[in-house]
Amino acid sequence: MHNRSFFRISMQTGAWLILAFLLLPMLVVIPVSLTDKSYISLPQDGLSLQHYQNYFTSAKWLWATGTSLFIGLAVALLATVLGTAFAIGCWFLSDRMSTIARWVLITPILVPPVVQSLGFYRFWVQLGLIDTYTGVILAHTLLALPYVSISVFAALANLDRRIPQAARSLGASVWTTVISVVVPAAKPGMAAGAVFAFIVSFDEIVGVLFLTVRNVQTLPKMIWQGIQDNIDPTIAAVATVLTVITLAIMVIGALRKS
């Protein structure tokens, strides 16, 4: 009994230490964002909200945030529609070719981001999509498709194949069967895939640096430029705002489940 208690306490302590190791580096940005200096540092003479004010009153920071949100939502919608259609088609076929297609689709996850971005750049130059919203949205959609398809595949794994067959035997068309039977079963995967697609797009920086110049300014690109040109504490304020929003969403989701 004593050994079991010691083992349980050790496991709990280890879990809390790992959690602290993961979270503490992110939480450091909170005091840094309150610094009273014009450079990255901990508060010295007192706390200041000047960098939050700079973020919420700066047109370029707000425009970059709006641009990232717009691109992220567009990518989430487009990737969810295409990824769901692909997953449902492969689920119906369930043959060797569909398996190969599934492996081909997940290659963006396996290829290094720099290699992907270089390929996008070479192809997008020929199509005239460099430094355009369309080019960024299409590139991010291709990067997000594997996450959507994997999520939908996982959701459809629980669907009995005899149910669509029964619907077809009762006279339902293929379209009706998909909309009434398959899509409802895939909705949890579609929702999760949409969230993943939005996060992938919102956080993407390497592809944006390759595909944009001046016309498209996303939030990660603004942060990158702030680090390269002058380490602006506004970056810490932006990071804090994003961290707080993420934690709030997680808490709300946990409360709803409980």
Image (spheres, rainbow, N blue to C red):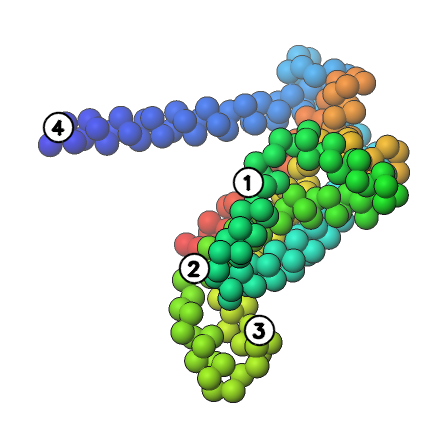
Q: Which residue appears at 51% of the width and 64% of the height?
A: 93
Asked whether 108 or 4 is in front, the reply is 108
10 Å crowding of disc 1: few (<14), some (14-19), many (20+): few
Callout 3–callout 2 Cβ contact below 8 Å: no
- Looking at the rendered structure, the kind of residue marked 2 is Ala
> Label 2, on which residue?
157
Q: Earlier in the sequence, mark 3 or mark 1?
A: 3
Which image quarter holds the C terminus?
A: bottom left
Secondary structure of residue under mark 2: loop
- Looking at the image, tell me whether mark 4 or mark 1 is earlier in sequence order: 4
Q: How many marks?
A: 4
Report the Cα–Cα distance between label 3 and label 2.
17 Å
**CA gap, disc 4 to disc 1?**
37 Å
Residue at screen point 56% across, 27% down: 27
**Dot 2 or dot 4, earlier in sequence:** 4
> Is residue 257 depicted above or below 6 in this figure?
below
Mark sitting earlier along the chain (3/2): 2
Q: Mark 3 points at which residue?
A: 179
Determine the CA span between mark 3 and mark 1: 35 Å
- Label 4 element class: helix
Identify the amino acid type marked 1: Leu
Q: Name the residue under label 1.
A: 247
Left or right for 94, reference 3: right
Counting residues from the start of the chain, the first of labels 2 and 1 encountered is: 2
Residue linked to disc 4:
2
Task: Where is residue 108? Give x, y as percent.
Answer: 62, 40
